[in-house]
């Protein structure tokens, strides 16, 4: 999949930009001042593949807590700050790898300059995050409400403040709860700047609905080559955000860390517990990383033929099952041996 050209730099040791893989980030929902709980949550997010983590910094105690948290975790930390430049400065002192702050909201250019100078000194990026709910009144009036123009113009105002201070390690996001507006805003933005883009659909909802909405929005952008890092926003455990984010990348072929499993939807011809088989096979091969496709099909009539592009697969029968490679049957086995036989064959590949 082609990616739009963007500038390349780092959050800690994780690269961002078109020369690096698209990363998945999330945000802790623990109280940042609760150091133990926050570290625990970050470690569990690391375990499911979170690449970068963002933490809310509501006060000085949280900014100071970042130092201890940073020392215990392995992935880059971004401090999320609203308005207060002192929290930004203290967070940088605590060793964070990036900031999320909108310079136009700080209110005093000298304070912005202090943040920028410190970011330059520590070589850390700043993400400007414009949301549909936080556009300045001036732009809402100028462009007639929340729309693509007011979103993009709002982002560009923040960008110009940083560029005027000769700061170029900028990451941008222009998120809306509306998919169409989000797509058009990112498209417009990517035509006028080449800074890496953090993409997502904001406030996308509960785990089930938000997963669908985020997958459509983020997927559509990535398919157009737009996006260098993603965040799936879900009302729920951030672990789900990371799992969904990773799966979006896998579905688009942007991440190949696991074996791809395809399976049929089942129909009146199915005589085996295909759902259970799929679940068990996925569990057994979850830790394997091979560039192969495994098919799990419900019947021997259509299964091997329908899945002939798969490297290996099984098709259920009545008490028996077939194992096939590239659509050609290689073995007939008892139903209860099907999973183990399949895993054996996968191991041989
Ligand atoms: Fe039905 Fe067989 Fe197709 Fe599965 S592979 S949907 S069981 S026809």
Image (spheres, rainbow, N blue to C red):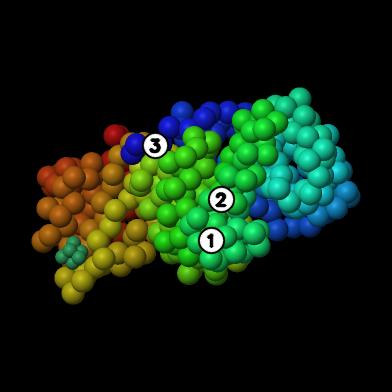
For label 2, the SS is: helix
Task: Residue under label 1, please give it.
Answer: 143
Looking at the rendering, which quadrant does residue 53 occupy?
top right
Q: Earlier in the sequence, mark 2 or mark 1?
A: 1
Kindly tell me whether residue 14 is visible in this rendering.
Answer: yes
Task: Residue under label 3, please give it.
Answer: 3
User: Which numbered disc, 2 or 1, marks the residue closer to the eye?
Assistant: 1
The residue lying toward the viewer, choosing from 6 and 52, is: 6
**Dots 3, 1 in contact, CB < 8 A:** no
Q: Within 8 Å of ligand 1, the CB of disc 1? A: no
For label 1, the SS is: helix
Instruction: Classify mark 2: residues with Cα within 10 Å, few (<14), some (14-19) or many (20+).
Output: some
Q: Quadrant of the C terminus?
A: top left
Task: Residue under label 2, please give it.
Answer: 153
Q: Position of residue 281 (x, y in %)?
A: 37, 53
Looking at the rendering, which quadrant does residue 266 occupy?
bottom left
Q: Position of residue 100 (x, y in %)?
A: 68, 45
């Amino acid at each position: 999949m082609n990616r739009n050209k963007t500038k390349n730099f780092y959050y800690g040791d994780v690269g961002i930009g078109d020369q690096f893989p698209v990363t998945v980030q999330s945000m802790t929902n623990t109280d940042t001042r609760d150091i133990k709980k926050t570290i625990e949550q970050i470690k569990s997010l690391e375990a499911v593949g979170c690449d970068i983590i963002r933490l809310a910094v509501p006060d000085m105690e949280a900014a100071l807590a970042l130092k201890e948290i940073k020392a215990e975790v392995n992935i880059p930390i971004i401090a999320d700050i609203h308005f207060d430049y002192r929290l930004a400065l203290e967070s940088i002192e605590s060793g964070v790898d990036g900031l999320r702050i909108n310079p136009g909201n700080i209110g005093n250019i000298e304070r912005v300059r202090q943040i920028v100078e410190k970011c330059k000194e520590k070589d850390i990026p700043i993400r400007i995050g414009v949301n549909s709910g936080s556009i300045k009144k001036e732009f809402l009036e100028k462009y007639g409400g929340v729309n693509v123009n007011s979103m993009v113009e709002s982002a560009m105002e923040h960008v110009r403040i940083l560029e005027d201070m000769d700061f170029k390690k900028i990451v941008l996001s222009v998120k809306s709860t509306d998919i169409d507006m989000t797509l058009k805003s990112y498209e417009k933005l990517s035509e006028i700047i080449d800074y890496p883009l953090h993409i997502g659909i904001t406030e996308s909802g509960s785990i089930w609905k938000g997963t669908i909405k985020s997958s459509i929005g983020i997927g559509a952008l990535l398919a157009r080559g737009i996006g260098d890092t993603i965040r799936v926003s879900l009302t729920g455990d951030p672990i789900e955000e990371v799992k969904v984010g990773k799966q979006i990348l896998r579905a688009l072929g942007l991440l190949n860390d696991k074996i791809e499993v395809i399976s049929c939807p089942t129909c009146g011809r199915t005589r085996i517990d295909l759902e259970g088989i799929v679940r068990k096979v996925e569990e057994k091969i979850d830790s394997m990383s091979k560039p192969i496709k495994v098919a799990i099909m419900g019947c021997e009539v259509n299964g091997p033929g329908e899945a002939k592009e798969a490297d290996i697969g099984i098709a259920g029968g009545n008490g028996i099952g077939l194992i096939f490679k590239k659509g050609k049957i290689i073995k007939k086995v008892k139903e209860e041996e099907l999973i183990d036989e399949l895993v054996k064959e996968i191991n041989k590949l």
